[in-house]
Image (cartoon, rainbow, N blue to C red):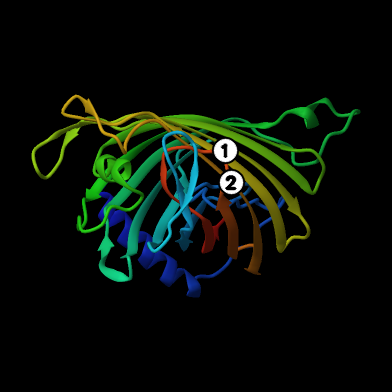
């Protein structure tokens, strides 16, 4: 965990493959709840997790700076993002570290003419998470005061530029292109509560700031701040099956290049809703998850987003106890 994000990614990939033949110890306790997007989060009785997956986003339109939705017309745009991550508890039960690497691949076709696929940038993330309070996972019981205590976690993370990638096509538009390759410190908090033995609600709030950097052409870029909030509901149907819904709101501040605000990099608002399902292939060690979500698509509700549309994701997780 103390080496580069590259080596960490390769180590996680190797361990994920080798773990198929590892002996499995008996695990006890309430089932862990996995929510898509929480790569590397260790939950319940788990001591470590590894997760790999991908997400496909075929875009259908965009929002201008005034919040008006416009279809892409003759333009065709889609992204494929590959992810690999993992986390483990260290020292004490309440402390865990995690890491993640993401590789985006983009397809663009303008007026019927295909543009060469765009690769990168590869961006890494390393973080630490501290559990202040832990839910009993029994649901709310008026006769048991401790059952009203939620899980409260604080975390800090650092976005790490690993490789700036090929600059043929901008994934996500000008703002994403300018922000790519920047160091991005951030942090936040997460609250989760079992309102019943089977129903879990959670809320997280995270802020980050992309540090200043220079582009390949030598221009200076001063990154903007971002704020992201996610609300989820999860139903633990059985020890092997869970499903739920999520809602996400993300704000991004303006990005400046050579002290001038770029037209495509002003403040942006994104809204996303969706659902997910997780199934234990070999409980409680192997779990596969699928997610179907969509950016908000309508007359109003978002602004300054070059591409919006549905998203489909699949991931595989290996847990260790």
The residue located at (60%, 59%) in the rendering is: 292
- For residue 222, which quarter of the picture? top left
- For residue 145, which quarter of the picture? top right
Circle 2/circle 1 CB separation < 8 Å: yes
The answer to whether one can see residue 222 in this image is yes
Task: Estimate the spatial distance between the alpha carbons at disc 2 and disc 1, rounded to whole Å.
Answer: 7 Å
Q: Quick one: 224 or 124, which is closer to the camera?
A: 224
Badge 2 element: loop
94 is higher (above) or lower (below) than 20: above
Query: Looking at the picture, how far across and down is residue 279, in whole percent?
Result: 66, 65
Query: Looking at the picture, how far across and down is residue 306, in whole percent?
Result: 39, 47
Residue position marked by numbered label 1 in the rendering: 301
Badge 1 element: loop
45 is higher (above) or lower (below) than 311: above
Query: Looking at the picture, how far across and down is residue 262, in whole percent?
Result: 26, 33
Q: Quick one: 300 or 318, which is closer to the camera?
A: 300
Which numbered marker is on residue 298?
A: 2
């Amino acid at each position: 965990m103390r080496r580069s994000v590259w080596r960490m990614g390769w180590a996680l990939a190797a361990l994920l493959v080798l773990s198929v033949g590892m002996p499995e110890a008996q695990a006890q306790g309430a089932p862990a709840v996995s929510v898509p997007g929480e790569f590397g989060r260790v939950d319940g009785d788990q001591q470590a997790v590894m997760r790999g997956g991908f997400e496909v986003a075929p875009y259908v339109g965009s929002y201008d700076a005034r919040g008006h939705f416009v279809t892409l017309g003759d333009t065709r745009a889609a992204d494929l993002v590959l992810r690999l991550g993992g986390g483990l508890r260290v020292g004490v039960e309440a402390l865990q570290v995690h890491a993640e690497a993401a590789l985006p691949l983009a397809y663009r076709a303008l007026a019927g003419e295909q543009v060469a696929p765009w690769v990168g940038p590869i961006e890494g993330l390393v973080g630490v998470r501290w559990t202040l309070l832990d839910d009993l996972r029994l649901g709310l019981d008026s006769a048991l005061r401790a059952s009203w205590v939620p899980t409260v976690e604080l975390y800090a993370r650092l976005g790490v530029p690993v490789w700036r990638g090929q600059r043929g096509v901008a994934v996500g538009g000008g703002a994403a292109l300018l922000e790519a390759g920047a160091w991005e410190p951030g942090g936040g908090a997460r609250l989760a509560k079992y309102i019943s033995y089977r129903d879990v609600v959670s809320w997280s709030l995270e802020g980050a700031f992309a540090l200043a950097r220079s582009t390949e052409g030598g221009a200076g870029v001063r990154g903007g701040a971002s704020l992201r909030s996610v609300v989820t509901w999860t139903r633990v149907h059985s020890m092997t099956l869970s499903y739920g819904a999520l809602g996400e709101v993300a704000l991004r501040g303006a990005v400046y290049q050579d002290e001038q605000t770029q037209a495509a990099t002003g403040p942006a608002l994104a809204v996303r809703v969706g659902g997910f399902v997780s199934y234990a292939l070999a409980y409680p060690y192997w779990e596969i998850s699928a997610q179907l979500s969509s950016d908000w698509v309508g007359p109003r509700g978002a602004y300054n987003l070059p591409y919006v549309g549905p998203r489909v994701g699949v991931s595989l997780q290996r847990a260790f106890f």
